[in-house]
Amino acid sequence: MMPIEVVPSGPVRARMRAPSSKSVTNRLLVISALAEGASLLRHPLDSDDTRAMREAVTALGASVEDATDGWLVHGTGGRLGAQSPLDIDARLSGTTMRFAVAMAALAVGSVTVTGAPPLLRRPMGPLLAALRALGADVLDEPDGSPVRLGGGGLKGGSVEVDVSHSTQFASAVLLVAPYAAEGVRIHVTGEGASGYLAMTLEAIARWGVAVDRVGADTWYVAGDQPYRRRDETVEHDASAAAHLFALAAATGGEVIVTNAGQPTSQPDAALPALLERMGCSVVHDRDALTVAGPARLRPLHADLRAMPDQVTTLASLAALAEGTSVLRGVAVARGHETDRLTALAHELRALGVAVTELPDGLEITGGARGPARLATHDDHRLAMAFAAIGARIPGVVVEDPGCVAKTYPQFWSDVAEAGVRWRSVGA
């Protein structure tokens, strides 16, 4: 897409569905690919990240077919094929990179997992160390290079996984643990977004594998415990819904997300509670969740370590609030698609906002004004967060808006459906 100018159109009034969860879709692709028999994933998210995961499990021997209301996955029973050297391209998907590397440890032959340069700069060390400790044939690679594995399976045993940079390291190990020759005892260290680990544990249990909690931050998975085939509907994406709610918060409007009311362990489902602290009203009604924005947003002081992805959303809203907000606990965001803290500080300053970059967060004094061109740094969450600013402040141009296809391909059409106009402008 060409750069777009978001045109303020007054308070939004919208009722819509959020897309399905990228995090859940990718976990279920791994599980169903390892399961025996055919499983149906109903209403999965179809995005760049989930296509990368779909192609990865297909390369490893599963078959994924389009069905009437989802994807039909013919599983491998844990017998992943790679009779000759195999290359998997994770594109820009961190989830795919980490989960595919763990799956590749179970393969018959050698597998190389690679991706776009920004992805290869993201941390992998704790996962590779854990897989080696469990008997995987992980070949040494320098930082910034593809990961090569010799295949041959996992022996099992005890392992410690540091999740300071990402809980995906622990999730990846847990997802493949049922196919180790012996049981796997995993102890998690470091502070991470524990809700994502809970999502993994819940999915594993739903698909028929027992995971025993044997201590604080320690779980045991018995070996030779295959997943059972299953039909499952993918729940809504709380991270995507957050960007829709931000439109209401920014404009003093109202957004009803009709499929966001059910309980979920997704960490970003806690965002509406923080929006309440900024002056929004939040109403739960069966399956729906309504957020109505105030005339003036209040500043926010919050520790976001449980939902680091939402630093982009809340920083953008803080730029519109009256007063100084402090967002902490998100040093991990420096290792996401880009260094999100530095990127946010740079772009918000272009709007005339006073921003102090902290080691683990941002201090933001509201007062955003246009015009300004905001770079998205090839980061889908920055692009979606900046939409809320443009819905309130005239003259905001969002560069490379198409990067939202990573997790929310129809985002800009949904923005238009919510009543926010935008138009393409010159590069």
Image (cartoon, helix red, strand yellow):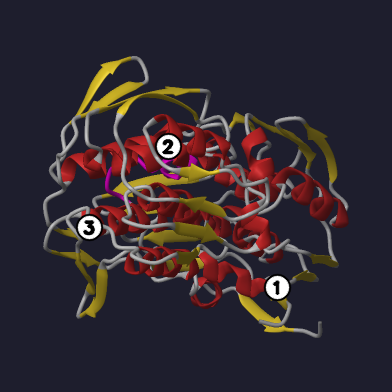
Task: Kindly identify the residue that appears in the image at 25 percent across and 52 percent down.
Answer: 31
Q: Residues within 10 Å of mark 2 (few under 14, many from 20)?
A: many
Q: Provide residue 281's location: percent of width, then percent of height.
A: 47, 44
Question: Which quarter of the rendered picture does the C terminus lie within?
Answer: bottom right
Relative to 77, residue 274 above or below: above
In percent of width and height, residue 75 lies at 19, 62
Q: Residue at x 44, y 58 (%)?
A: 111
Q: Nearer the viewer, residue 105 or 317?
A: 105
Q: Amino acid at mark 1?
A: Asp
Quadrant of residue 355 within the rendered picture: top right
Disc with the residue nearer the chain's start (1 vs 3): 3
Amino acid type indicated by mark 3:
Ser
Of residues 126 and 325, the one drawn nearer to the viewer in this rendering:
126
Image vertical order of residue 1 relative to residue 128, above or below: below
Given this view, does label 2 or label 3 mark the residue nearer the observer?
A: 2
CA gap, disc 1 and disc 3: 34 Å
Marks 1 and 2 sit apart, C-alpha to C-alpha, by 37 Å
Provide the residue span drawn in magenta: 261-272
State if disc 3 and disc 1 touch (CB < 8 Å).
no
Q: Identify the residue under disc 2.
A: 131
Is residue 122 highlighted in magenta?
no
- Mark 1 or 2, closer to the camera: 2
Amino acid type, label 2: Leu
- Judging by the rendered image, the residue that carries numbered circle 3 is 32
Q: Which mark is residue 400?
A: 1
Q: Earlier in the sequence, mark 2 or mark 3?
A: 3
Residue 314 x, y percent position in the rendering: 63, 45
